[in-house]
Amino acid sequence: MKSHLYPILKFVVGLPLTLIAFFFITKIIFDQAPALLPHITNLNPVLLLYGILCFLLFYFLRSFVWHRILNGYGYKIPFKDSCYLWSVSELKRYIPGNIWSFLGRAVMFDKKGVDKKDIAAGLIIEAELFVLGCLVVSLLSLPYFLPHFSSVIGWVGVTVAGLIIVVYVYNRQVAQYLPHKLRSTIHFLFPSFVPAENLLLIGISVVALLFFGVGNYFVMTAAFGTNPQLFPPLVGVFVLAFVAGYLSLLTPAGFGVREGIVMYALLRITSSGLAAFTALFTRIILIISEIIFIFLSYIWFKSRSVFVTNVEKWLKGHVYESIVFGLSAIYTIYIATISILRYDNYYTGRFDLGNMAQTVWNTLHGNIFMITNPNGTESISRLAFHADFILVLLAPFYALWQDPRNLLLIQTIVIAAGAFFVYYIAQVVLKNKNLSLVFAFAYLINPSIERANLYDFHPVTLATTFLLATFYFYLKKKYALFLVFALLSAICKEQIWLIIGLFGFLLFFHHKKHLLGTGVFFVSIGIFYFLFWHAIPQTLGSQHFALEYLSEYGQSPTQVIKSILLSPDLLLQTIMEKHRSHFLTQLFSPLGYLSLFFPFFLIFAAPDLLINLLSNNAQLHQIYYQYTATITPFIFLSAIYGVWVIKKALLTLSFPRTRESSVSGFRIKSAVTINIFFIVYIIIFSLHSAYLYGPLPGSKEPNIDMITKPLPQRDYINSVLEQIPVHYKISASNNLGSHLSQREHIYVTPLGIDKADMILIHGSDPQAKETLKKVDKDPRFIKVVEKEGFVVFERK
């Protein structure tokens, strides 16, 4: 009898039940359509697309968690098969009565030979991981529901969540100290995987739910704008509402419970009508995204093409590289969007984006490496200020899109690529992919990296990635590529030649490449000397302008170096000043000061680090500009080797080398525990520093003015600037300079007024007002535009 009933049950749970699920989904959408339609006429399609992509990633990662659980039980089912079967079984949760989704999972995976007991245990683990992930992400909602939220409450929440995760990760070890009956219960309810696998599954679940929360935020923002500062709390709110619905077993897919919590939360920032619309609209888009995911997973499941097979093989063998790529893509999309919005809303200027764009534009049009003197009106070589010859190499890329935003995009892509080199270097040194992945994440969320990326475009910021690549290829003994990236690094700024010279020492003493090391050292030091002592001063007509920042140490490079070397007391006194020591905290705390355990590579950063610390220009000892670009890579290198030193010391002191299998096995377990400790340690310090010093929404000092304070008349200003002939000589306010930089002559007011064909002023600073009064009385010019502080004069 049982053998006859089971095929019938399989049929009922299969296609018919799926069709019933689609019926309930359609009913939900049509029932809510009257409330939604009036609000969807002005949706932002880009933000809506971002939201759908986040939802797709959410479903993809959840299916991957299920795939890993099955792998843990010894089932080697292809990921595309488990992904499709998981998505179809999940669809059945929309049918009233939660048993259908569990029953669907059992029947779907029974076809793949998965034992029903393992499916039941896997479902319990999946639910636990989901709730744990929600617990972590929901902590972000604390400041939203507790207006007088204190850091103490936050740390208590983090501590409690951390303890729960530790117990879950080490459940087998904890169970050893419990009574036998309780121990057997824990063995049944909790996974029997190794701690590293448990931690990985929790990490994936947390990331999946972050995508869920971010997707809801994007969908909501597509309908009506919100303060980006509320981004983290609202992400937590959506996840908290989601888990509340998930735990309400009486409603299909938590419908009604989730919406009620979302509406209650959003009433704090919007009207009841919009709150209700958001709760329903985000649910509908989530459902549509799930249908899209099922469709895509079905196509993948049925695909048999050679290309898809090769991609699958590559992804299977490069899971961690794929994650790094995904993180880098997210970084690129966000930072590039914000950078371009800064440009669009005139937060960039002639200093410095305009200077770089004009140099590249001039090079593209035959005036190689030429620029209008920012401090005068004559055309001079860019070499008068910096030997950043990388700008010449960017000209061919600029030809594809002659727009300053091209430089912003190139800069973001290159910096994001640095995450790969951090990952690969950590993998070579630490031999642990999870730890290497965490270092790559720490790189992308590093405040110095993000701040430098957002502050206009500077060639030296590209050197962050190029220096990491230089070290990686040095490490792998691929000397041709080492020389390529060493050269690319050096031509980003003149003092980087000194850093490349230090690589010559490594080649000579460590790799025993005496000829190559000697050549790299003397050529690099020679070029550095020539540029600093001769080429730049001769082009400028005086000493390097940056020497003014160190004027108290001397008036020439030689005097400055002598004074620093012979006055260690003055050096130490200067560095210990409060704002300078705080600069060091901002640099080293994102990696938990691990760099100090292997300070050797900080020698490479010493030239720029000393210049920044000793400078009388306050901007140089802040992380908000490009001045940390050549320091950050070596902080990461020192931190990676710092972890290596600590691990080696702990394992050597605790377990001397032995061949006894029991001791060796315990040594391996201890190494796993140490790796997990460093993973958690780095993540905590990275996130904490991102909050304290980073530019992301939700941090203490977010760089989001381009979103919250857009320039109201930007479209009008754009229309005026587009009509100006490219051969005109322009004198303009600094904030207009980057938009007018693609010409041979561009001056910053009040410079160039006598030579300019047009004068454009926008702003309320005293200098702009004085220039406006002066030009207004000048009979050679006529006012052609005046609107809300934007004034344009044209020569008669």
Image (tube, rainbow, N blue to C red):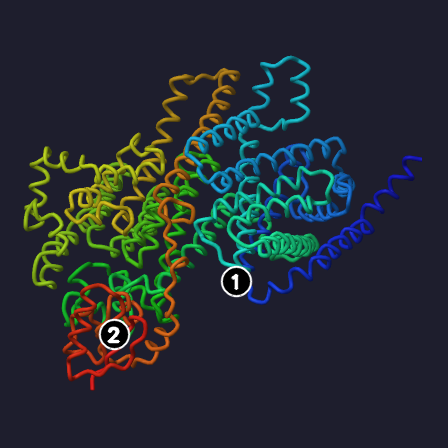
Q: Label 1's element?
A: helix
Mark 2 or 1 closer to N-term? 1
Q: Position of residue 201 (x, y in %)?
A: 57, 36
Q: Residue at x 29, y 81 (%)?
A: 725
Q: Nearer the viewer, residue 189 or 515?
A: 189
Question: The N terminus lies in which quarter of the figure?
Answer: top right
Q: Which mark is residue 613?
A: none
Q: Nearer the viewer, residue 648 or 524?
A: 648
Q: Position of residue 728 (x, y in %)?
A: 24, 80
Q: Label 2's element?
A: strand
Q: Position of residue 214 (x, y in %)?
A: 53, 49
Q: Quadrant of residue 376?
A: bottom left
Name, please, the residue furthest toward the right. 1
Label 1 sits on residue = 46
Above or below, comparing residue 659 to residue 43 in the picture = above
**In this rendering, position of residue 430 left or right of residue 777:** right
Q: Amino acid at mark 2?
A: Leu
Sort mark 2 into few (<14), some (14-19) or many (20+) by Cα contacts within 10 Å.
many
Sort mark 1 into few (<14), some (14-19) or many (20+) by Cα contacts within 10 Å.
few
Q: Residue at x 55, y 44 (%)?
A: 237
Q: Quadrant of residue 356?
A: bottom left
Q: Nearer the viewer, residue 671 or 616?
A: 616
Q: Amino acid at mark 1?
A: Val
Label 2 sits on residue = 760
Above or below, comparing residue 543 to residue 795 in the picture = above
Q: Residue at x 59, y 45 (%)?
A: 61
Report the label total: 2
Q: Quadrant of residue 574?
A: top left
Q: Nearer the viewer, residue 564 or 150?
A: 150
**In this rendering, position of residue 306 left or right of residue 378:** right
Q: Are marks 2 and 1 in contact (CB under 8 Å)?
A: no
Q: Is residue 310 something that shows in the picture?
A: no
